[in-house]
Amino acid sequence: MTETPALLRMENVWKTYHSQPVLRGIDLDVAPHEVVCLIGASGSGKSTLLRCVNLLETVDDGAIFLDGAELTEVGADADRARRRIGMVFQSYNLFPHMSVLDNITLAPIRVHRTPRATAVAQAKELLERFDLADKAQEYPDRLSGGQQQRVAIVRALATRPSLMLLDEVTSALDPELVTEVLAIIRELKESGMTMVLATHEMGFARDIADTVCFLDDGVLLETGPAEQIFTEPREPRTREFLQRVLEARRI
Ligand SMILES: Nc1ncnc2c1ncn2[C@@H]1O[C@H](COP(=O)(O)OP(=O)(O)OP(=O)(O)O)[C@@H](O)[C@H]1O
């Protein structure tokens, strides 16, 4: 049986801030259609890992590949590959002076050179799909946090990425708004989107992840199927972390 080549591959990735290593030799393969959740204590390096994949940070050592093309290299192929990644942040980062529709069509028109009419038609299709069609002309400050985050997800999808990175996308939301955002992520999984998510929500990670990666102080300490990590973690530090999270939830 031949193994499916990884869509995303990280090889020995190191990142240091002010001589403090934050990622220490990360090796990670993400298969097409796989959903990977990064878990770990605050400061363990989850956001930094995602930001390195999206090249918002430069890596100090190692390499990152998307579909075999090296993202961490300078050149046209790397640029093309980078444009196939969508990222959504905790703070939605929508442009406040632009309508929802303009926020969504901006990158397709400016970066991907999609003709305006096509970009608008595709944006409207996405808004319809995610139940936001009536918000197309609204400005972000007229939307709830949950709606803004859904628009941010739609905006990332508008460039038709082959990989989505989601960084704590529900952390800034009131609990009653979290559900609607999680529902979108679930739908994306069902549609076959490859995703890497950083999350503090263990219930969600258990529910949605195919694979869970436990980051501990910049080291990918344990990677495994979600069910195994949450029921029988191999590493004592993974067990301790999960226990701590569970106890905190009881308080
Ligand atoms: N731009 C930066 N400059 C200096 N240090 C940074 C920078 N970004 C992150 N760090 C440090 O890198 C470490 C990892 O941070 P990171 O945000 O990746 O962790 P995290 O696991 O995502 O945390 P959280 O769960 O709180 O979001 C932390 O010690 C953080 O202070």
Image: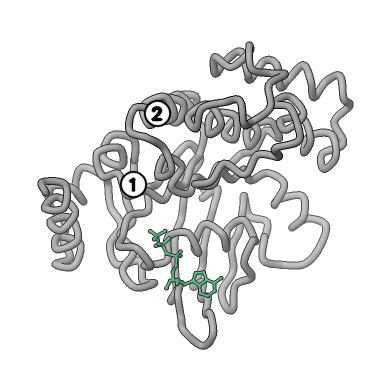
In the displayed structure, 147 sits above or below 53; it is above
Badge 1 residue CB within 8 Å of ligand 1? no
Q: Quadrant of the N terminus?
A: top left
- In three-dimensional space, the C-alpha distance between marks 2 and 1, rounded to whole angstroms, equals 25 Å
Question: Sequence-wise, which precedes: disc 2 or disc 1?
Answer: 2
Badge 2 residue CB within 8 Å of ligand 1? no
In the picture, measured across the screen, residue 145 lies left or right of residue 56, that is left
Q: Secondary structure at mark 2?
A: helix
Q: Residue at x 69, y 18 (%)?
A: 136
Mark 1 surroundings within 10 Å by alpha-carbon count, few (fewer than 14), some (14 through 19), many (20 or more) = many
Q: Which residue is mark 2?
A: 177
In the picture, measured across the screen, residue 238 lies left or right of residue 72, that is left
* Position in image of residue 67 (x %, y %): 62, 49
Do the numbered discs 2 and 1 sit on residues whose CB atoms are within 8 Å?
Answer: no
Q: Residue at x 51, y 27 (%)?
A: 144
* Position in image of residue 227 (x %, y %): 20, 42
Amino acid type, callout 1: Thr
Q: Secondary structure at mark 1?
A: strand
Query: Which one is nearer the viewer's eye here, 176 or 119?
Result: 176
Amino acid type, callout 2: Leu
* Position in image of residue 166 (x %, y %): 49, 45
Where residue 114 sits, quadrant-wise, is top right
Please give the label number shown on residue 211.
1
In the picture, measured across the screen, residue 199 lies left or right of residue 187, that is left
> Which color scheme did the rendering employ for the protein?
one colour
Where residue 186 sits, quadrant-wise, is top left
* Position in image of residue 150 (x %, y %): 54, 29
In the displayed structure, 4 sits above or below 69; it is above
Q: Residue at x 63, y 20 (%)?
A: 126
Q: Residue furthest bottom?
A: 19
